[in-house]
Each structure stands twice: as C-alpha cells, then as structure tokens.
Amino acid sequence: MLEVLVSLLLLGLMLLFFDTAQYAAWHANQSAYELTQATQQVRSMSERLKMLGGYPDFKEQLSIWNQENQLILPNGKGYVSGQYPRYSIQLCWDSQGNQRCIQKGLL
C-alpha cells in the first residue's frame, strides 16, 4: 500500500513538472509570436513612410496603422517621430502584463 502511495506521489509530481514545462514553452512561443508580429508592423509603417516621401501629413496612415496594431497585438500602440527622410518608429504592446517595445530608425 505504501508503494502505491509513493508511486502516485511521484506520478503527480512528474505531471506537475510537465505542465510547468509546457506552460513555459507556451509563454516563450507567445512572446516570439508577438515580437514577430510587431517587427512586421514596424516594417509596414516604414514602407508606408517611404512611399509617402516628403508628404508632411501622415496622420491618416498612422491612425490606420494603430488600428491594425490594436487588432494584432494586445494593447498595441505605435509612435512615429521625426521628419522626412529621418523617422523613428516605435511600437509598444502589453505582453502577459509586461510592456514591450521595439524601435526602428528610418533614413
């Protein structure tokens, strides 16, 4: 009887370990996915700014881009500063309770 209880305890501990490992893998996968999506969004805005050239009013494109950011990333919000041809693009989002940001300078 004691052997059965010890075996069940060991089995329970192994299952708990596997569950913890699976959660850590899911968390890492989710973070990588969000970073990939954010990188693609920054590239998208970079291409839009290049396409607009020296057009001074890009607020409409920024608004559209931020609507996309909200759909793709949790609490995604992008910022663009600078003037043509030197822009700085920053995109921030909430990743499992932590705010993450990426930034790109555009020349």
Image: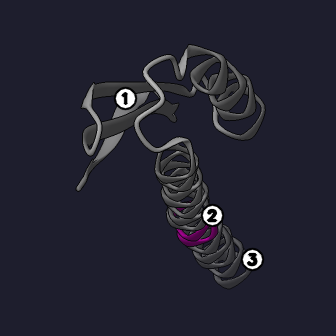
Binning the other alpha carbons within 10 Å of mark 2 as few (below 14), some (14 to 19) or many (20 upward) gives few
Instruction: Read off the magenta span.
Output: 21-26
Position of the C terminus by quadrant: bottom left
Q: Is residue 60 above or below residue 10?
A: above
Left or right placement of residue 83 versus residue 72 in this view: left
Q: Secondary structure at mark 3?
A: loop
Foreground of the two, 10 or 88: 88
Sooner in the amino-acid sequence: mark 2 or mark 1: 2
Q: Which residue is mark 1?
A: 99
The residue type indicated by label 1 comes to: Gln
Q: Residue at x 27, y 25 (%)?
A: 81
Q: Which residue is mark 3?
A: 1
Q: Which residue is mark 2?
A: 26
Foreground of the two, 85 or 96: 85
The residue type indicated by label 3 comes to: Met
Residue 73 position within the rendered picture, expressed as x and y whole percent measured from the top left? 64, 37
Sooner in the amino-acid sequence: mark 3 or mark 2: 3
Disc 3, disc 2: CB below 8 Å? no
Residue 40 part of the magenta-drawn span: no
Closer to viewer: mark 3 or mark 2: 2
Sooner in the amino-acid sequence: mark 1 or mark 3: 3
Foreground of the two, 38 or 106: 106
